[in-house]
Every structure is written in C-alpha cells, then in structure tokens.
Amino acid sequence: MSILKQKINNKKAKIAVIGLGYVGLPLAVKFAKAGYSVFGVDKDTDRVEKIQKKVTYILDVPKEELASVVNKKRLQATTDFQVLQDMDVMIICVPTPLKRKYTPDVTYILSAVRTIAKYMKKDSLIILESTTYPGTTEEMILPELTKKGHALDKDFFLSFSPERIDPGNKKYDVTRIPKVVGGLTPKSGALTKSLYEKVIKQIHLVSSAKAAEMTKLLENSFRIINIGWINEVALMCHHMGIDVWEVIKAADTKPFGFMPFYPGLGVGGHCIPDDPLYLYWKARHHGFSSKYIKLSADTNSAMPAYAIERLKDVLKTKNKTLKNARILIIGATYKKDVKDLRKSPSLTLIELLQNKKVKVDYHDPIIPYLEIGTIHQKSVPLTPANIKKYDCVVIAVDHTKVNFNMIYNNAKLIFDIKNIYEKKPHKKVVKL
C-alpha cells in the first residue's frame, strides 16, 4: 500500500477509467488535468476515435479541456484492454441497466471485472463507480478478483464510490460534488480517499463498500419517491379543481421541513428510473418489499398515459377528438437543456400517441431528429405558421432556447405540463 500511496501522492500512478460515458469521461479528464497519466478504455470505437480527435461528446466536458489533456498525452483513449496490465488504479464506470422492470443487469460490471482480473498487476486499486445494489462489490467483484489467488489488502485494494454526476449542472461539476467512498477494508477506503482528494474538494469516507452502495440508492430513491408523490398530488389536485403549482409555491414559503418537487411526465435519464429498482430487487432477496419504491416507479411511468387522457379533455373544449387532432410536443429530452434521450418520458408520450394513430410531431432545439424505437421524425421548425397548424401544443420540456412567447401568441391551445405560462392569462392554456 505504501508504494501505491506514494505513486498516488506524487501523481506517478497510472489510472485507467473503464467506460467513457457521462460518468467516465468527465472523471478521466479531471484526473488528467490534475497531472496523472490516464487511459480511457471503452469498447465503443466511436467514443475512442472522438477523444483521439479531441472532439467532446459529453456536455460537461469542454472541448478546450479535452484538447488540452489529449495534446499533453495526459489522456489517451483506447479499445485495447491490454493496457490494464500497466495500470495502478482502475475505475469502473460502465452502464448498469435493467434486464426487466425490476431486475438489475450487471453483465457490464462483470465483464469489466473479469477483464481487470485477467490483466491486473500486484499492488493495484480497483474502484467501482457504476450504480448497483448493496453488496455488489463484496459479493460479486471480490470473488472474481481473488479467483487466481490474489489477496485483498495484499495484492490489490477494492472500493466503491458512487458517481454523482448531474448532466448539464454548471455549478456542480465532478470536482465540486462531495464524493462518498467506501472501501471493502479500511486500507482500501483510505487509499481511495487519498486518490479522490487530488481532484475532488470534499471526500466523505464511510465504513464499508455496502454503505457507499446504499448511499447512492438512498439519494435516488428519495428523488423517485418524492417525484412520484408530487405527480400523485397533481392528479389529486386536478380532481379537486386545485392548481397544484400554486400549492407547491405556497408550501415552499415554509423555511423548514419542506423541499419542493414538481410534477411532469415522469422521470428519465439513467439514475432515477433505474437505480431505486436495484434496491427494490435486492431488498426482496432479503425478504423485504419496498412498497414506496415500487409505487413511485409505477406512478411516474404512468404519467405519459395520464397526460394523454388529459389531452383528450383539453381537446374536447375545442370540440376536437384526439384522433382527428394534430399535436406538437415541445421537448424530446428527459431534462431541460441536456442533450440526453435516455428513458425520456417525452419519447414515451410520442410513442403512445403514435400507437393511437394520432398525428404527432415534435420540436426540440437540441435534438434535430429522432431515430429511436418506432419514432422516425425530424424536429419541426418553430415558426408562427407551423405553430398555427396544430390543434394543441404540449409543453413537455422547458428548454431555454424555445421561444415560449411565440408559441403562446400563435397556438390555438396549449397543454402546459411545465407551468411555463404561470403568469400568462389561462384562456387557451391548460396546466397539468
């Protein structure tokens, strides 16, 4: 440990980041910028070629930063996993999707760990950042790394440190978000803490890898449950003839004991739709059923279908049926101003409308076309003439670059899911 710690402290440690997506690439760039020799390893040849050409494909990685570390050869990208044999530190940042609705798919993690086990040298540190269920590091990764006789705390060190990337958040980049670290042993935890301290301002060391794994799932379960609850409140308020947005705004005046969440089409991205379900799945294996997680996930996933029922009611006010109407959806991404379509509820809404044979188009200033699932469309230009063609405009995502005043001035009818028109007269605006 002392030799590896010296390498980390004097920045002589070679670091491999396995998986160059939303988590891996920003982390790799920050370590490279701090002066480490970093190798980004990914099976995706397109990603690797873009890095080699100094072309960023992640919103949170400025092209200048990427170009700087590549030019200095601080960051090198490759599809050749054999480079792992020279690495002192290996950080796993691979996807962890769901096989089915409530079953985690850990095949990407297993593949990465088995490759590491094949190549890792003595006195190396392995860190898992991919979100997964509590116990993964100890129950799945450790056995793979010890199969060939390697001993923990002697030949290698092993920790879990959950990623906390928030795509598009300019205030909190990877270096400004406090980092939770949990080692499989105290030595592993201390070594991992000393590594991350070189690039991240605040490190919080917990007692075990399992505690760190649970921390990540608590964070995201907190969010899915509260989003599910506020979506249910929105449905409740509609039935009672109450403006849910007014209620949230009023509740938010309380200086303690309340945190505002806002209703919408559901949840998207990788973390919120999937991560809590890893916890739900693991808890069931311990004979415990997490009712809150399942109920919240089901509530959120039902929101696009609910939006369609509301859309039917909205159109009735203009003597229109859904099948005979033309609908324009504003926003295809899962989040405002972030070029990310992963599990976007807007896409679910479009698909559901298509399945009902509704004439539906979309506009998104950062997604010029959609070739995903059954959706094959180009973004409709947002002009007064185009807006007037539609019987209803649905505000699904509140992108900054959308001219919402133009929409308001030219639309026949607006179904406002994001409360964009809070201060506008509601004569032709119907809110969620």
Image (cartoon, rainbow, N blue to C red):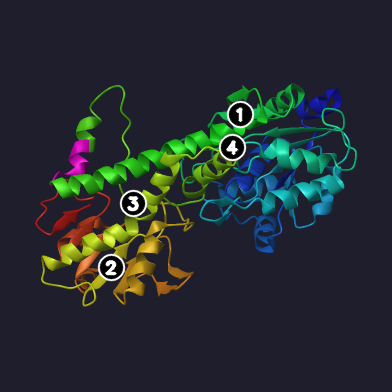
Q: Is residue 359 above or below residue 80?
A: below
Amino acid identity at mark 3 = Thr
Depth check: 397 or 100 in front?
100
How far apart marks 4 and 1 lie (CA) works out to 16 Å
Q: Secondary structure at mark 3?
A: loop
Residue behind mark 2? 328
Residue behind mark 1? 211
Q: Secondary structure at mark 2?
A: strand
- Side of 296 where 213 appears, left or right: right
Residue behind mark 4? 286
Task: State which tag comes first along the sequence, 2 or 4.
Answer: 4
- Side of 53 where 153 appears, left or right: right
| Residue 227 picture quarter | top left
Closer to the eye: label 3 or 4: 4
Q: Is residue 150 magenta?
A: no
How far apart marks 3 and 1 lie (CA) works out to 38 Å
How far apart marks 3 and 4 lie (CA) works out to 45 Å
Residue behind mark 3? 400
